Image (cartoon, grey):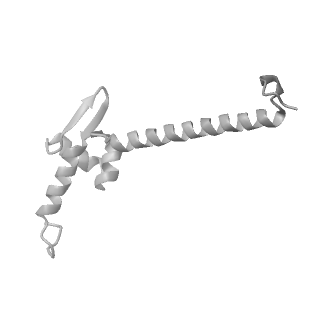
Amino acid sequence: MRNGSKSDVGPLDRALERLNEDLDFKLMQERREQEEALVKELVQQEWISYPEAERYSGLSHTTLWRYVSSGQLKAARVGRSVRIYFPALKAFMDEKAMKEVPGESLRK
């Protein structure tokens, strides 16, 4: 017979307590992962590497380098690394796309 004392906690009660603790831990871990994913979505890189710029624009490394060297694309050198300003690359690509007239050849 139980009298409600702590020493009367049986193995099933302890197992239930552990399951509740595990569930709480898993819920906290899931919430933390969701928050981390949200933060990652909100943070947008403004400065990107050449490979990232190549994937975004579809241009080769050499073509991007020419635009950076000529000053047509904003870039910064940090140590030995070069980073291209993503908003400038996006605006550059939008400008190039707008200059093309539908139905005309893309080659000059």
Q: Residue at x 24, y 47 (%)?
A: 64
- Please give left or right for residue 17 compared with residue 28 in the image: right
- Please give left or right for residue 33 compared with residue 76 in the image: right
Q: Quadrant of residue 106?
A: bottom left
Q: Residue at x 80, y 29 (%)?
A: 9
Q: Quadrant of the N terminus?
A: top right
Q: Residue at x 60, y 39 (%)?
A: 26
Q: Quadrant of residue 75?
A: top left
Instruction: Return the residue nearer the eye: 47 or 14.
Output: 14
Instruction: Return the residue nearer the eye: 6 or 1.
Output: 1
Q: Residue at x 12, y 70 (%)?
A: 101
- Please give left or right for residue 38 compared with residue 22 in the image: left
Q: Quadrant of the C terminus?
A: bottom left
Q: Position of residue 28 (x, y in %)?
A: 55, 36
Considering every residue shown, the one lying at the far right of the view is 1
Q: Position of residue 70 (x, y in %)?
A: 14, 42
Q: Quadrant of residue 21?
A: top right
Q: Position of residue 51 (x, y in %)?
A: 35, 45
Considering every residue shown, the one lying at the far bottom of the view is 103
Instruction: Return the residue nearer the eye: 27 or 87.
Output: 27
- Does the image show residue 84? yes
Check the image and report above or below for 73 versus 99. Answer: above
Instruction: Return the residue nearer the eye: 99 or 30.
Output: 30
- Please give left or right for residue 12 compared with residue 43 in the image: right
What count of labels does the image hold?
A: 0
Check the image and report above or below for 23 versus 101. Answer: above
